[in-house]
């Protein structure tokens, strides 16, 4: 069985003539440790796919299996716990808590899960993010690129099985976007982290190992560009 398996996945919003098929019978597999970019124009189904892979929405039909666990055969409570521990989510707009420092934002997922943060791991993550000198700063005191780095660290500190990034550079200028993409590459290369990145930017997608392309909710291209 593949590390991440997506089988006959569909998502329909609404009913009857008003129904919109956002995702239409999509199937693919991702081996452990691969960096995948999902591309497509606006409305192609990219974000719908990410929400289904991340367990934040339920499909109309189909199966998502991560490391042997079928996401949607679980209860809501069990899925919430699994998502918190096994899936790291990075969004376009950072989603940081403004009244918490960089360090506090990093450890928040662990605290919410009732776990005690490892201070050495937190310090190491701050070094990886290039934010050691900003650990006591608040989000408003950071650039957009720095805030996105915190969001990535926030998602990774729990050691998730899968990191999902939805347009992680979409709210950044080209220099900051390049820096964030290089950080994702670095993390993937040094830790073997499995990464699925949603993007509309072909330049960024080419930094991944594989490109999956969606159009009108359907998978139209699946290409490994490097191993």
Image (tube, helix red, strand yellow):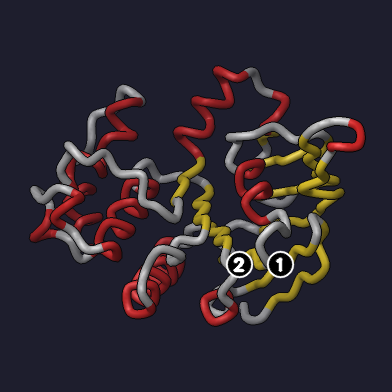
Secondary structure at numbered mark 1: strand
Secondary structure at numbered mark 2: strand
Instruction: Please provide percent x and percent y for residue 175.
Output: 33, 79
Residue 110: quadrant of the picture: top left
Cα distance, mark 1 to mark 2?
6 Å
Q: Nearer the viewer, residue 15 or 23?
A: 15
Q: Is residue 169 left or right of residue 82?
A: left
Residue 61: quadrant of the picture: top right
Residue 9: quadrant of the picture: top right
Name the residue: 64% across, 64% down. Answer: 38
Query: Tags 1 and 2 in contact by the CB under 8 Å rule?
Result: yes
Of mark 1 and mark 2, the one earlier in the sequence is 2
Name the residue: 10% across, 51% down. Answer: 137
Instruction: Please provide percent x and percent y for residue 87.
Output: 51, 42
- Determine which residue is flagged by label 1: 212
Q: Nearer the viewer, residue 112 or 100?
A: 100
Q: Nearer the viewer, residue 220 or 113?
A: 220
Instruction: Please provide percent x and percent y for residue 173.
Output: 36, 74
Q: Is residue 199 left or right of residue 182?
A: right
- Determine which residue is flagged by label 2: 37
How many residues crowd mark 2 within 10 Å: few (<14), some (14–19), many (20+)? many
Q: Is residue 164 above or below residue 70?
A: below
């Amino acid at each position: 069985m593949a590390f991440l398996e997506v089988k006959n996945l569909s998502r329909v919003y609404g009913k009857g003539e008003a129904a919109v098929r956002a995702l239409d019978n999509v199937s693919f597999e991702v081996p452990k440790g691969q960096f995948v970019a999902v591309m497509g124009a606006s409305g192609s189904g990219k974000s719908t796919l990410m929400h289904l892979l991340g367990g934040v929405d339920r499909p109309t039909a189909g199966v998502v299996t991560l490391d042997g666990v079928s996401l949607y055969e679980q209860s809501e409570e069990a899925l919430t716990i699994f998502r918190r521990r096994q899936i790291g989510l990075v969004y376009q707009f950072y989603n940081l808590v403004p009244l918490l420092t960089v360090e506090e934002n990093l450890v928040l997922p662990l605290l919410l899960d009732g776990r005690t943060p490892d201070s050495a791991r937190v310090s190491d993550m701050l070094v990886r993010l290039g934010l050691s000198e900003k650990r006591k700063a608040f989000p408003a005191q950071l650039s957009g690129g720095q805030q996105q780095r915190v969001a990535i660290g926030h998602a990774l500190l729990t050691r998730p099985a899968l990191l999902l990034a939805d347009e992680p550079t979409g709210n950044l200028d080209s220099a900051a976007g390049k820096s964030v993409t290089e950080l994702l590459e670095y993390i993937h290369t040094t830790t073997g982290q499995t990464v699925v990145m949603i993007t509309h930017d072909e330049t960024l997608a080419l930094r991944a190992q594989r490109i999956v392309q969606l159009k009108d909710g359907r998978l139209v291209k699946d290409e490994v560009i490097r191993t």
